[in-house]
Amino acid sequence: MAIYKRLYRPYVGRYTGNRFRFLVITKSALRTLFDSRPLLAFFVACNVPFTIFLMIIYINNSAAAQALLQMKNAPIVIDNFFFLRYLIFQSTLSFLLTAWVGPGLVSIDLSNDALPLYLARPLTRTEYLLGKFGVIFLMTSVITWVPGLMLLGLESSLAPIGWFERYYWLFGSMLVGSLLWIGVIGLLSLTLSAWVKWRIVATGAMLGIFFALAGFGEALNGVLRTHWGYLLNLGFDISLAWFDLFRMAPHTGLDNPLFELPPWAGWLTLGLLSAFCLLMLNKKLKAREVVR
Amino acid sequence: MTAVIELEDLSVRLGTKQVLDSLRASLKGRAIGLLGPNGAGKSTLINTLLGFYPPASGSAKIFGKDIRTHTKELRHVIGFMPESDSFIAEMSGVGFVRYMAELSGLPANEALERAHEAFYYVGLGEARYRKVGTFSLGMKQMVKLAQAIVHGPKLLFLDEPTNGLDPPARLRMIALIKEIRDTQGIHIILSSHLLRDVEECCEEALILKDGRIAAYCNLEEERRSNKKFVELETVGSKESFTQAVEQLGCECAWLSGGRAKMVLPENISMRDLYTIAAKNQVQIRKMNYRRDSLEDIFLRAMEGQLQPQNKAVQNGHL
């Protein structure tokens, strides 16, 4: 029907599938986010370390490139620690990206009281959350595990025979380590976005949780002469889990307090934080709030 | 015919407060009005039917399907225009409505086409690329209506649709609601505290008070049955006049100051009244032809003079 015929007509066309309807939310949010040029520039810049690591792997495995650069041997050893360093780099960037993007995702709907409009449609609260989480997942995946697996694939194909047999498990470590980080920071940012309506304040709170809690943990360690205070440091917790996943052991030669605490403590803390975030989101993401 | 909405002892408790208390109703009209003073439970009923609040006991069905077990299925066929300002201010009007259409399951291209149509339909075609946050209150109401109808729902919940509208905008909104109502295959639930809105748009009205059904009113039947409801102001002997009109089948009730209310049977015309009055030497100084308005029904319901259950049996609806 042409739009000049201003009549109401029922819709008789086909409908999209229910299962992935939540991706409409993701698509719309991504479209809005990438309208911002500074964000686009930062997002592109997040892949610079990937390019550097890519070049290192290539040079390390190419005699021609080494000769061209007047190197006698492969410059570095590419092992599990190399890829862990890559993950740490990229995860730091993904945290900054999430701190930029995440706090505005839910707060925009809550401040406009738009949640009833979403939930009056064939969309559950879980799907709404998945749609919003999808934004963080896609953006951070592109700078963490996707290029990480590409680097591992490149190294496996260029390295001498035996490297893949020795390090094939790194594929799983890279994937799980990245997804764990994405899950935790994604949930944290969405929770802050749901509870703090002002985006700037929510971003500040996210950085605050990361740094202030770490400082508090250090103070706790000093006062109680313990290492358990490190668990308040989100970066430390994820590092515990990563060290476990990347099979880093004390004999690696690192002088690191990470080896003072058992890996399960990191996993448990991250699990508890995620559960807390889900609980808070469940409390907040309702079409109508009941004022008791 | 399957009832549009069926409530079976529906109770809703929010926190410690019983907001809806054992509602029983079977509503079948094309346009159903929900009336009641503030806090009567109108919005809670709508929110419960939309699945936002879980029933504490009892059940509710829409088109014969339980709202708890068929929530997603029902939301495909429901459109909702909330009372409060609900939109995404940073989006363009058409972008927002398209987004809502896509969330309702329309493919992207169809959603965009329908969003444009909906905007033109509500009279905001020229403003569709402006950000929703820049719209006036009246325009926002229209945007809310556009997003509610964009996916072609079979049941439309309108929560206070004329709130904040100036008289011309209100008339436009009412006209749109009537037009949508008259489209085949769509039902409207209109919640309002404005009796006029309900009276103009609805066929049935459910009057709520303190979370209970205070009255049910089939406006269509009321309109038909009260076609010859008249108020008179007379001078002269009323006894003989009363006797004469009652012999013709009129119901007559006298008030103070020579005022009378009468319900005339179908075969009696106004002219007959003047003839009888002349014969009985009664002067009719004033005659008002009026029907029992929704306002009368509402006020009686608020005063507790109506018995909803009796009325229900009479109407065969509740």
Image: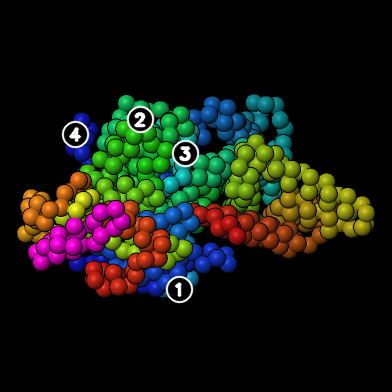
Q: For label 4, count other residues whose C-alpha is less than 10 Å away and answer few (under 14), some (14-19) or many (20+).
A: few
Residue A67: x and y in percent read: 66, 29
Q: Of the residues under marks 2 and 3, which one precedes in the sequence?
A: 3
Crowding near the residue tagged with mark 3, few <14, some 14–19, many ≥20 C-alpha atoms within 10 Å: many
Marks 3, 1 in one chain: yes
Residue A56 coordinates in the image, percent (x, y): 65, 35
Q: Are marks 2 and 3 on the same chain?
A: yes
Per the model, the C-alpha gap separating discs 2 and 3 is 14 Å
Highlighted range, magenta: B237-262
Is residue A267 visible in the rendered image? The answer is no
- Count every numbered label the image shows and give the total: 4
Q: Name the residue under label 3.
A: B88
- Residue A258 belongs to magenta span: no
Helix, strand or loop status at disc 1 = strand
| Nearest the eye: A81 or A284 | A284
Tell me if B6 is positioned left or right of B232 in this view. Answer: right
Residue for badge 2 = B128
Callout 2: few (<14), some (14-19), or many (20+) C-alpha neighbours within 10 Å?
many
The amino acid beneath tag 3 is Ile
Label drawn at residue B57? 1
Q: Do labels 3 and 4 share a chain?
A: no
Disc 4: host chain: A
Which quarter of the figure has residue A207? top right
Instruction: Please report the residue visible at 31 percent of the width from the left and 43 percent of the height from the top.
Output: B150
| Residues under numbered marks 3 and 4 in contact, where contact means CB atoms less than 8 Å apart | no
Residue holding disc 4? A5
